[in-house]
Image (cartoon, rainbow, N blue to C red):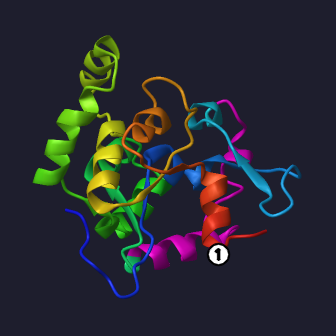
Amino acid sequence: MPRGLELFPKTIYCIDAIDLGISNVLFLSSENADITFTVTSSSLINLMPHWKRDVYRRDVFPAIWEKLESMINNEELISPLEVYEEIKVGQDELYDWCKNNKKMFRDIDDCQRQKLKDIKKHYDKSYWDNESRKPRWADPWVIAISICEEAIIVADEKNTQNRIPSIAATFGEKCLTLLDFFKEIGIKY
């Protein structure tokens, strides 16, 4: 449901599942002077030695996790419940963190159901049919909740056909990469 008029409106961000996995996918990089890490696909993590996977846990970058939790408490960081269900499959440290911060995950409402009908029209039919057969697919729900809650999407996907940034753009929704999100909320290392 769109927010009403607010005296001091706050910016709300809606984050995709892959970006919540920052505890498992952050790598140091000297490419960016403001933020010193880049993000890779979580599927690549399984190819890495165990010691590298655990390097960037909460205790290594506590300021990031504290900022995210503060945003959750202020209702500035949300995600659809479908993202929680995707993460739940892993039963890992990230899932434990999400369980402890479950209030950020929003259940499906009438506004999202209505927007989903419009969103579906912008996907290729074969792509939609294939993805929707999977046990969990949160992408269209990320877009739907961002429209309904007037939230900025955080999704590290390429702006190509059938991806969150491309579909979201057709609705005029802003989409940030994780690094751009960190810059916008003032995280620097």
- Indicate left or right for 58 with 10 as reference: right
Q: Is residue 13 above or below residue 51?
A: below
- Indicate left or right for 3 with 27 as reference: left
How far across and down, in percent of the image, does residue 45 sit? 63, 37
Residue 49: within the magenta?
Answer: yes
Residue drawn at x 28%, y 14% as measured from the top left: 125
Tell me the SS state at disc 1: helix
Q: Residue furthest bottom?
A: 7
Callout 1 amino acid: Ala
Q: Residue furthest top?
A: 126
The quarter of the picture where the N terminus appears is bottom left
Residue 87: within the magenta?
Answer: no
How far across and down, in percent of the image, does residue 68 sit? 51, 70
How far across and down, in percent of the image, does residue 70 sit? 48, 79
Q: Which residue, given by chain and number where applicable, does mark 1 sit on?
A: 63
Instruction: Say which of 149 and 84 sits in front.
Output: 149
Quarter assignment of residue 98? bottom left
Residue drawn at x 47%, y 23% as measured from the top left: 161
Label 1: how many residues lie within 10 Å, few (<14), some (14-19) or many (20+)? some
Instruction: Say which of 168 and 92 sits in front.
Output: 168
The quarter of the picture where the C terminus appears is bottom right
Magenta residues span 47-72
